[in-house]
Image: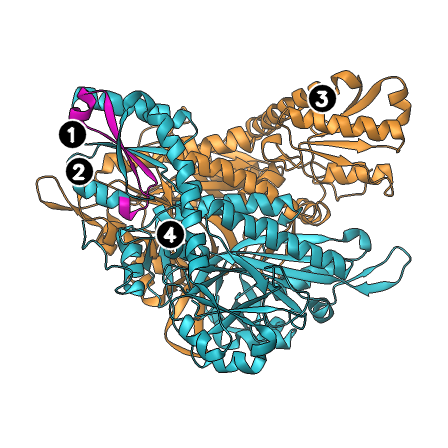
Chain colours: A orange, B cyan
Amino acid sequence: MSGVLTPRDADFPRWYQEVLAKAELADSGPVRGTMVIRPYAYAAWELMQADMDRRIKATGARNAYFPLLIPESYLAREAEHVEGFSPELAVVTHAGGKELDEPLVVRPTSETVIGEYMAKWVQSYRDLPLLLNQWANVVRWELRPRVFLRTTEFLWQEGHTAHATEREARDYARLIHDEVYGRHMSDRLAIPTLPGRKTQRERFAGAVNTLTLEAMMGDGKALQMATTHELGQNFARAFDIAFGSAVGSRALAWTTSWGTSTRMFGGVIMAHGDDHGLRLPPTIAPVQVLVTVVRRSSDVDLVAGRLVEEVRGRGVRVELDDDVDTAFGRRAVDAELKGIPVRIEVGPRDLAHGNVVLARRLDRTKETVPLTRAAELAHAALAETQQGLFELAANRMADRTVDVSSPEEAVAACRAGWARMAWSQLGPEGEARLADHGVSVRCLQTPDGGLPDSEDEPGVVAVLARAY
Amino acid sequence: MSGVLTPRDADFPRWYQEVLAKAELADSGPVRGTMVIRPYAYAAWELMQADMDRRIKATGARNAYFPLLIPESYLAREAEHVEGFSPELAVVTHAGGKELDEPLVVRPTSETVIGEYMAKWVQSYRDLPLLLNQWANVVRWELRPRVFLRTTEFLWQEGHTAHATEREARDYARLIHDEVYGRHMSDRLAIPTLPGRKTQRERFAGAVNTLTLEAMMGDGKALQMATTHELGQNFARAFDIAFGSAVGSRALAWTTSWGTSTRMFGGVIMAHGDDHGLRLPPTIAPVQVLVTVVRRSSDVDLVAGRLVEEVRGRGVRVELDDDVDTAFGRRAVDAELKGIPVRIEVGPRDLAHGNVVLARRLDRTKETVPLTRAAELAHAALAETQQGLFELAANRMADRTVDVSSPEEAVAACRAGWARMAWSQLGPEGEARLADHGVSVRCLQTPDGGLPDSEDEPGVVAVLARAY
């Protein structure tokens, strides 16, 4: 089976590209930096989306849809914002067969257009909080694109909310950060994340505070999985999102924005994949159990069909593979590449003894089990896989994170993993020096791993890494 | 209550615009012809989407995602296709801070880019059928935009499939037409539709056959709700979608494409709305039952809260309206504008007698009912509403469709509704003449309302109407 993929240790980026192609996850699009999300990966994305959407709605937010094309002048409204995006913009100059009077920008984010409508919809304190979310595509011209991780077009959700008070806005941002993003990643993606606060250098333009969740990939690098921004009154001021209070005075709202994207799926590949391919957490696996016919016979066909029904009866997403025109070994390799969590192999020889084989993708173990218990054991193996993947990733993060006391030590440590260093020791100057070595402050934490209220809090720790 | 909306008979287009605004369904976007879909309408769209998605997947199709931006040269691949779209295109000429070597088109449909990848993915007969669907936004520059009905950007699903034989492609197209589109509209949108075949004039560029579902709006005009195209081998030839057969020979595939969009929601508004606002079919109503507190008291609050739970316990989407700071009459008007199917009004006076009031949006009847039966009766009223809206629309379509025997009679009849005329009598010349009067052939049917296999079949009837 070796040789299907370049080993991760030999060349991690190449391994990643091979997994994308061989597991039929994505192709490069016709325009540089764009991607085609193939059905198998898209099905996983839909499962991720459904869970996120449910959690987002549980916070009280409602989905809406805002236009793709934004007048260029809108972006000038928030100057700091434009500066951050300008070289990344794709611009429509012609439409309807002629040159447009004003060029239109393909949204890199909907901050500006949503700000405009929030200002219109918010009049009184009774219109607050206004909690909006949008699932959409956005376009940012990328110089060094990489499928899922950094693409010219990607799919995302962007939340935008307005609140009457700073406290409410802050509490809501933390709810999104913890209960939506944090829980989705731990409970669904089986990816442990480090929650923290961004430094001023890494913060979103216009935000007064950016919360992040950082995950460690298989090569020890960091991936920023989600960010949540407290925008203070900056955006409300730029877009005049103001409300009349109960006593009649007028005040600016406090806003937040928060987003996650198809990049998360790149994180799933790189956090859980091994040298045999993808390993999908069962909760987002389009096929959780594959019942594989080793060789056909009337008995095997009957049993395999019944097993599919029995497994499905347990609420499991199950598929039958009886494509015996393709060699059994090839099918097993494909199922491993695609990261299908559990396979049940049904063959005439085992069946003669009333047995089938249960194969777990998590640790690639195979076990001969009685047919009568196969569905139950497959179901149990799914829960073990979900837990097992989380533990592997958590152990890696723990094992590969070291405490350091100088930028030089940090650079060395970040060749294999992450480094932790007192922020009071490092500071913005140290941060700038590390950047020259490709190492960044992923986030700031309190000593006990919590969210600091400011950079200057005593004991704040900087977590350092190379990052995607 | 009169005066909330312009009556439909007085000015239908104005009534439509007022419903959009007052029911908080949509706003115009900042760029001419675009729209902002507000949360209430978007929630209805999500319910429509979920049902459609389930039906599409039940046919075996899988969702995928293809890029928004398409190289201009791709559209030249299918010349006939380009000709159909060229003035409608929005073109990106600048990105990454400079002019692009090749302009990029914002997809007006993904036919060309999906064709390209289908050609890559289809090699052998074993790769067929390839059944793809995509939920996406598309952009077509509209000269006369109207929110939901004809917008510069809209949301849609586009299905694209490739098959080994003409028969398979045709059967699949009919499955989509009947079981996905037809059933969604009748069973979910409560909109009866006329299924038929498009004339050559109305057919999609490149299609050998276009199937359509046409619905009658409240003003007697037609709205094309969905189209399904049999593309023969035209697209397969243009994009080289070919496969090796079991015996080794190579053949072109047979393809189909099919789409529905947010325009359908415009159809829901115009098919069911009355002079008091929207009337939403319960299956797509974000709020099916509204429990309204008339005046607060501890009894009322307790009962209203319990009622919400009881109604929810029946699997109904229910909300509580206890916003007594807003006048009761105003809240009732708003609920009518938004087309909430059923309201239960809880007030101290009725409650003293153990009663509440059940208000049905369908026919605006109000009935005093025992509190103990309120949840059950509300639940039953939902089913009656779903059925009742369908019947009202079906009766209108029957009442306002007349048989005619000349183009002149057709023009007269189409001022109030639809006309039916023998296609052999009308023909392409008559069709062209009717176009000058704003009347088009919505579809061709067999005498018994079925799908003709060709325009030349004996007895074929043309259904004529003014259309959106």
Which residue is pictured at 44% across the width and 71% down the height?
Answer: B141
Q: Are marks 2 and 1 in contact (CB under 8 Å)?
A: yes
What amino acid type is highlighted by mark number 2?
A: Phe
The chain holding disc 4 is B
Percent across and percent down for residue A257 are 35, 45
User: How many discs appear?
Assistant: 4
Element at label 1: loop
The chain holding disc 2 is B
Percent across and percent down for residue A172 are 32, 35
In this orientation, does residue A108 appear? no
What residue sits right under mark 2 in the picture?
Answer: B328
Q: Quadrant of residue A298?
A: top right
| Residue range (magenta) | B336-361
**First in residue order: circle 4 vs circle 2:** 4
Distance between the alpha carbons at the discs numbered 4 and 3: 49 Å
Distance between the alpha carbons at the discs numbered 3 and 1: 56 Å
The disc at residue A375 is 3
Percent across and percent down for residue B255 are 70, 62
